[in-house]
Amino acid sequence: MLKRMILKKITITALTLFILLLIYLMPTNKINNRNLDVKQNLEYTYTNDLETIYLLDYNDYVARTFIKGCSCSSAVDKASDLLQGLIVEGKKNNIIPNGFKAIIPSGTRVLALNLDKGVLTIDFSKEILEINKKYEEKMLESLIYTLTSINGIDSVKILVEGEELKQLPNSNKQLPSLLDRDYGINKVYNLTGTNNIDSYTVFYVNEFNDNYYYVPVTKYINNDKLDKIKIIIEELTSNPVYESNLMSFLNVNTKLLDYEIKDDVIKLNFNNLILSDITGNSILEEVIYTISLSVSNEIDVKEVIFMVENEEIYKKVLE
């Protein structure tokens, strides 16, 4: 009898330990979130196409990079998709490239989106106002540059819980009703006074884990006769290293001889020192991109043609 009771206790104990082991090994998170995972997969079917997005890099610059886009065709749907990459812990944060991070506060929701005549109106939940003062302007820069990279979107209007955002939440800096690339990005002020202020934006190269990407910097100066095309080229040649970590690969002796804008095309005519090898006819990819991105940010063109002493070398079609 005693032997039978002991055997029964041993059996019950062994069975209990076995059940506890199964519970411990069971992937409970996966089971609990199964319905959520299926829903996300249905809503976000990613293609191999990459979309431009502007995120914070490891130096806190708002920088140009790419993430996989959704299988959607309308500008509003693309905007809705990319906004999930800009929100901390958004639905696309798992595919943000290494070295970059989102900036819109976690928990922010997009309540409504509307596109009318190139103006994208976004209604955010109140959590967007919880942005750190250090990053409130960068948040807007990230939003503006990302969304105006989508064909059909020229400017952005921001609402919070249905009310227009008229000033930054911390500094109380007044905002224009419509936000476009004139707002600037990674701003630098080289001003000597308050008169004849103008600006231009130069794209520089930065590097993370042996991968190059592009960082735009808007510079404000006093100049009432600013030829933005010439001054962009001068900036890229005079600053091979800008702010210690941003680079330009343009030879310091490169000269822009002249340029012509016709219809949607700009032709830039350089001396032969723009070539990566003067015995050949090639230009570094980083040079092509820094110039093309900088020029197209200032003027509305669809093609940038690179010429060397009046001979066409390369044509960059802008996306």
Image (cartoon, grey):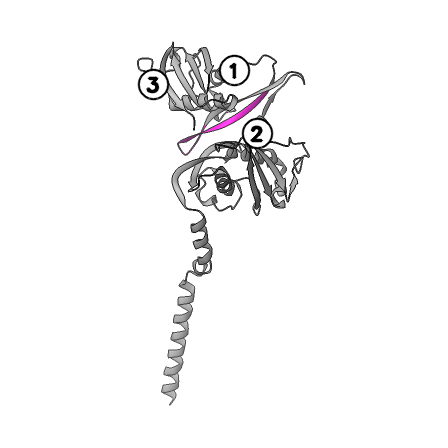
**x 42%, y 60%: residue:** 27
- Please give left or right for residue 22 compared with residue 300 in the image: left
Q: Which of the numbered marks, if any, corresponds to residue 282?
A: 3
Q: Do residues under tags 2 and 1 come within 8 Å of each other at their CB atoms? A: no
Q: Nearer the viewer, residue 262 or 282?
A: 262
Identity of the amino acid at label 3? Ser
Inter-mark Cα distance, 3 to 1? 23 Å
Any magenta on residue 218? yes
**x 36%, y 82%: residue:** 7
Inter-mark Cα distance, 3 to 2? 34 Å
Q: Which of the numbered marks, if any, corresponds to residue 231?
A: 1
Q: Which residue is the site of mark 2? A: 180
Provide the major secondary structure of the magenta segment.
Answer: strand
Q: Kindly state the secondary structure of the residue where label 1 is placed.
A: helix
Q: Earlier in the sequence, mark 3 or mark 2?
A: 2
Crowdedness near tag 2: few (<14), some (14–19) or many (≥20) residues, C-alpha within 10 Å:
many
Q: Which of the numbered marks, if any, corresponds to residue 273?
A: none
Crowdedness near tag 1: few (<14), some (14–19) or many (≥20) residues, C-alpha within 10 Å:
some
Q: Earlier in the sequence, mark 3 or mark 1?
A: 1
Q: Quadrant of residue 309?
A: top left
Q: Kindly state the secondary structure of the residue where label 3 is placed.
A: loop
Q: Kindly state the secondary structure of the residue where label 2 is placed.
A: loop
Give the magenta range. Answer: 206-220
**x 47%, y 15%: residue:** 261
Identity of the amino acid at label 2? Asp
Task: Select label 3 or label 2 by which is in front.
Answer: 2
x then y, percent, for residue 16: 41, 74
